[in-house]
Amino acid sequence: MKTLAVLGTGTMGAGIAQLAAQNGYEVLFWNRRETSVEKGLGAVTKGLDRMLSREKISQADRDAALGRIQGSSALDDLKRSDIVIEAVSEDRETKLELYSRLHEICTEDVIFATNTSSLSITDLGRDTGRAEKFIGMHFFNPVGAMKLVEIVRGLETSDATAQAVTDLAEQLHKVAVPVRDMPGFVVNRVIMPMINEAAYALMQGVAEPEAIDECMKLGCNHPMGPLALADLVGLDVVAAILDTLYRELGHPHYKLCPLIRKRVEAGWLGTKTGRGFYSY
């Protein structure tokens, strides 16, 4: 693989694009809105400049990485990609609409990889027209720092596709861990109930947000408390994942805390909007 298409220019898309460009891949960075493409390119530039200021990369490496990224708002530009990594909003219909169009544009050997955090790989793959070439490639935020990539095969994903995506993750200096196609996979299935329970504890007056997070950091040796983590992930994303888990698995500990729901309704989505459980 030489050319990666990254669909979605938000936090995860920008992180994946930056990571790929730093590791020598040509990146086609897509969003349907040109203003969003520019915003995403700005986020990548800011990320690289931060690394430069911390002397983690040289000026030449920073400039070379930026030079490998081409922003686009036209899907036709993605036809020369070797793999499409999709990181758009966590909405099944939005993803499938894109895959349907890309199936007509991309050659049959192009792999479609989704960064979904909770949706069924088998279900999405079935409707793409290339189930054997469809797979989950779940990165974590912040992409540059988090070593894990969950590799999630659908029932029809081929061995060759799984191996190619595993090899790509390793080329990006990530640890690729295979997991089964179950709601939430591993990390979100375990971590989301903790975030939800922390929100319930706050709602019931057990402690203030800072105290809840400090208890989990000092008592469980977590690097970040669950409420701060929720703000980093995005409360809209947390809500979408918990709703999926509750719908698919039915266990009450996945039922979304009203405190999270109300913040999403208010547009308090966490760090990306400047307010969530904390103000930024």
Image (cartoon, rainbow, N blue to C red):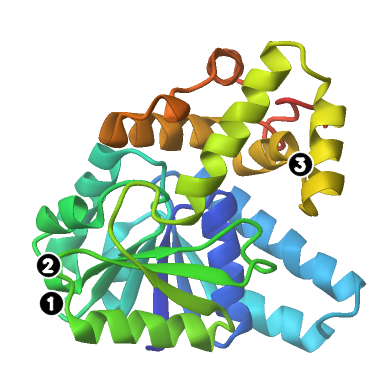
Q: Left or right: 194 with respect to 176?
A: right
The reply to whether the C-beta atoms of the residues labelled 3 and 2 are less than 8 Å apart is no
> Which SS class for mark 1?
loop
Residue lying at 11% horizontally and 53% vertically, measured from the top left: 127
Rendering coords of residue 5 (x, y %): 39, 69
Give the Cα separation between the discs numbered 3 and 1. Answer: 44 Å
The N terminus lies in which quarter of the figure?
bottom left
The C terminus lies in which quarter of the figure?
top right
Kind of residue at badge 1: Glu
- Category of crowding for the residue at label 3, using alpha-carbon neighbours closer than 10 angstroms: few (below 14), some (14–19), many (at least 20): many
For residue 8, above or below residue 272: below
Rendering coords of residue 53 (x, y %): 91, 71
Which residue is under mark 3?
Answer: 225
Task: Looking at the image, tell me whether mark 3 or mark 2 is earlier in sequence order.
Answer: 2
Give the Cα separation between the discs numbered 1 and 2. Answer: 8 Å
**136 or 221: nearer the viewer:** 221
| Circle 3 or circle 2, nearest the eye | 3
> Which SS class for mark 3?
loop
Q: To which quarter of the image does residue 87 belong?
A: bottom left
Residue lying at 78% horizontally and 42% vertically, measured from the top left: 216
Q: To which quarter of the image does residue 20 belong?
A: bottom right
Which of the labelled discs sits on residue 108, or is there none? 1
The reply to whether the C-beta atoms of the residues labelled 3 and 1 are less than 8 Å apart is no
Which residue is under mark 2?
Answer: 130
Rendering coords of residue 66 (x, y %): 64, 74
Residue lying at 61% horizontally and 64% vertically, measured from the top left: 143
Residue lying at 12% horizontally and 68% vertically, measured from the top left: 156
Q: To which quarter of the image does residue 63 belong?
A: bottom right
Kind of residue at badge 3: Gly
Give the Cα separation between the discs numbered 3 and 2. Answer: 40 Å
